[in-house]
């Protein structure tokens, strides 16, 4: 199975880059994982929020394909425990799809059109995180999900 993460903006901060890189390397043992960083829209300070989301939408759509199961990481999505998220991933891998695409929007979230195109929405927490922080939290949780599925010692219950 292939898992792709599409995120708006370049990851900044060595600690974030290193943390994400660490979990990305660990994921190689379980799945084909790719992270696509779409550059921030230029002159975004001069745009309305709706116009910015619309322009980000155009860029995101370049990486979406009709055969993938698309999931928005969205504050209004379903919340899962780590164990339930691992079961969710297992079900998608086993029965439903060969490819999953997760989407992290920019600072103002994901456009309505992209959200409507998604097959599902997942919230990592009721708390709000920066869109860059979400990359680290998500990558760690994806790694944790695979270690749970393999009954490895990473996750303690």
Image (spheres, rainbow, N blue to C red):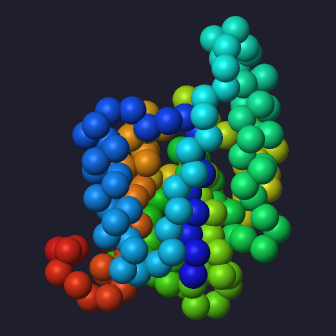
Q: Can residue 77 be seen in this view?
A: no
Above or below, 53 relative to 42: below
* Outermost residue, top side: 46
Above or below, 150 relative to 4: below
Residue 10: horizontal and vertical position, in percent? 50, 36
Q: Residue at x 28, y 48 (%)?
A: 18
Q: Which residue is drawn at 36% across and 85% down?
A: 149
User: Would residue 135 be found to the left or right of residue 119 on screen?
Assistant: left
Above or below, 145 relative to 115: below
User: Would residue 100 be found to the left or right of residue 10 on screen?
Assistant: right
Above or below, 34 relative to 91: above
Q: Which of 51 and 78 is in front in this view?
A: 51
User: Would residue 95 be found to the left or right of residue 79 on screen?
Assistant: right
Q: Residue at x 58, y 91 (%)?
A: 94
Q: In which quarter of the image is residue 92?
A: bottom right
User: Would residue 26 be found to the left or right of residue 99 on screen?
Assistant: left
Residue 74: horizontal and vertical position, in percent? 57, 47
Residue 82: horizontal and vertical position, in percent? 35, 69
Quadrant in which the N terminus is drawn: bottom right
Q: Quadrant of residue 23?
A: bottom left
How many marks the image carries: the answer is: 0
Q: Which residue is drawn at 43% across and 48% down?
A: 135
Residue 62: horizontal and vertical position, in percent? 77, 50
Quadrant in which the C terminus is drawn: bottom left
Q: Can residue 135 be seen in this view?
A: yes
């Amino acid at each position: 199975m292939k898992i792709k993460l599409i995120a708006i903006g370049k990851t900044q901060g060595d600690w974030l880059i290193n943390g994400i890189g660490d979990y990305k390397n660990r994921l190689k043992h379980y799945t084909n994982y790719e992270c696509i960083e779409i550059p921030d829209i230029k002159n975004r300070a001069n745009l309305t929020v709706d116009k910015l989301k619309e322009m980000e939408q155009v860029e995101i759509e370049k990486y979406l394909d009709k055969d993938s199961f698309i999931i928005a990481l969205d504050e209004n999505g379903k919340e899962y425990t780590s164990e339930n998220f691992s079961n969710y991933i297992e079900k998608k891998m086993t029965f439903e799809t060969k490819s999953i695409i997760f989407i992290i929007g920019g600072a103002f979230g994901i456009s309505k059109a992209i959200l409507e195109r998604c097959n599902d929405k997942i919230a990592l927490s009721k708390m709000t995180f920066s869109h860059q922080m979400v990359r680290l939290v998500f990558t760690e949780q994806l790694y944790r999900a695979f270690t749970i599925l393999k009954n490895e010692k990473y996750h303690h219950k």
